[in-house]
Amino acid sequence: MKASVVGGSGYVGGELLRLLLGHPDVEVGQVTSDSMAGKSIARAHPNLRGASDRRFVPRSALEPADVTFVAVPHGEAMEEVPALLAAGGIVIDLSADHRLRNAAGYPEYYHRDHPHPELLARSVLGLPELHREALRTADLIAVPGCIATASILALRPLVTAGLIDSQRVVIDAKSGSSASGRDAGPAGQHAERSGVMRAYAPAGHRHTAEIEQETGARVALSCHAVEAVRGVLATVHGFASRPVDEKELWRTYRAAYGGEPFVRIVHEADGIHREPEPKILAGTNFCELGFAVDPHAGRIVALAALDNLMKGAAGNAVQCLNVRAGFPETRGLEFPGLHPI
Amino acid sequence: MTQCPECEAIVESHDMVLGEVFPCPDCGTELEVLGTDPFAVQPAPKEAEDWGE
């Protein structure tokens, strides 16, 4: 299967290339970048030195492929995707442009109308844990955001099981600097970012729309930038609708994800890694989920950790490709991570 | 097989012997084999602060 990447010079594009170059069922085709056209992909992604002799091509030179990954900023993908779909093949969009089923969410959260709202009904959200069967036949797959992925996977089982008041949920998310992308602007400068603990979106983060769409909950989301390059930790605070103990939470999460290849339930009795922690997941496609019961406050705390560039973007996109193409779901995604790191 | 009394994970005997201590594969709780036929476990006693003195 030939795969092309539109917008291959960014961090997500680099992770896609790393994964696709190692995927035994995929041949990497064209990789576009207008700003780096003609240059080796290793110029943007030095970890890929020697892995490929591919050079970036301008977007205008893109030819049809069996699957095209779109890793361009929000707002650009919605202009690109119709032509890609018309040319045939599968389109996997890693931007936010086809995640929301309701077009009204775009002016509310992205400050622009969607130019092709008819595609929103055609798009399938790229979260195999929720939409595996629909993904098997989808021609437009919209990979959810990193904070949204972590939050949805942690929160949804609690809502589905009726364990919490779904209209009163608070999510506190921390993310590493790579989540802002390669061109993050002044907020990503070392002097501003080093040592940071910044509430960059205490309210109104755009991933709220995805989380509410996929969980049915009403969510109050606050997002923070922390001193890390990769990683998301989402802490979900729900208020119990009845008495709940930890055994019931084990049952709930096992029922939701017991057979999932990339979801691990982590809530251990001892040790220093008792709950999910993004650091040890760097470079892997795993999302780890943990939980705790707070009887004093009538609260259930759910935790989700992942690598924002992997299960939060490129890794999840390749997992979706595996599902769509009928490949083993873990193919190309077996890396277990590093420790210590 | 039986269940972990802490998290309800399925735990299997794997020819363990009476008194053997092993971690639950899911929650990591140290479990002690109480019986082999039928297989039964309980959380292992934790070391007291003056253990060994």
Image: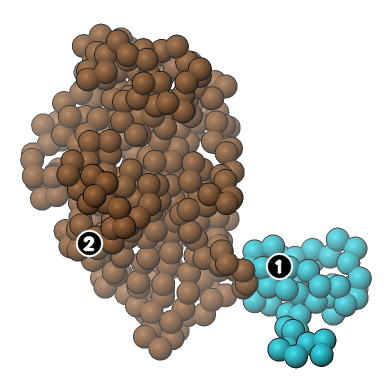
Chain colours: A brown, B cyan
User: Cβ–Cβ below 8 Å for labels 1 and 2?
Assistant: no
On the image, the x and y values in percent for residue A120 come to 22, 37
Q: How many marks?
A: 2
On the image, the x and y values in percent for residue A32 come to 29, 18
- Alpha carbon separation for disc pair 1 and 2: 38 Å
Discs 1/2, front: 2
On the image, the x and y values in percent for residue B14 come to 86, 61
In this rendering, position of residue A81 left or right of residue A280: left
Q: Pointer 2 indicates a residue of which chain?
A: A
Judging depth in this view, the residue of A32 and A215 nearest the camera is: A32
Is residue A21 visible from the viewing direction of this image? yes
Q: Residue at the front extreme?
A: A191
In this rendering, position of residue A326 left or right of residue B19: left
Residue at coordinates 28% horizontally, 39% vertically from top-left?
A: A181
> What residue is shown with label 2?
A199
Type of the residue with mark 2 = Ala
Image height check: is A101 above or below A40?
A: below
- The image quarter containing residue A107 is top left
Q: Secondary structure at mark 1?
A: loop
Q: Pointer 1 indicates a residue of which chain?
A: B
Residue at coordinates 38% horizontally, 79% vertically from top-left?
A: A299
Type of the residue with mark 1 = Cys
> What residue is shown with label 1?
B24
Dot 1, crowdedness within 10 Å: few (<14), some or many (≥20)? many
Dot 2, crowdedness within 10 Å: few (<14), some or many (≥20)? some
Judging depth in this view, the residue of A43 and A82 nearest the camera is: A43
Image height check: is A234 above or below A166?
A: above
In this rendering, position of residue A186 left or right of residue A19: left
In this rendering, position of residue A332 left or right of residue A6: right
Residue at coordinates 76% horizontally, 80% vertically from top-left?
A: B44
Q: Secondary structure at mark 2?
A: strand
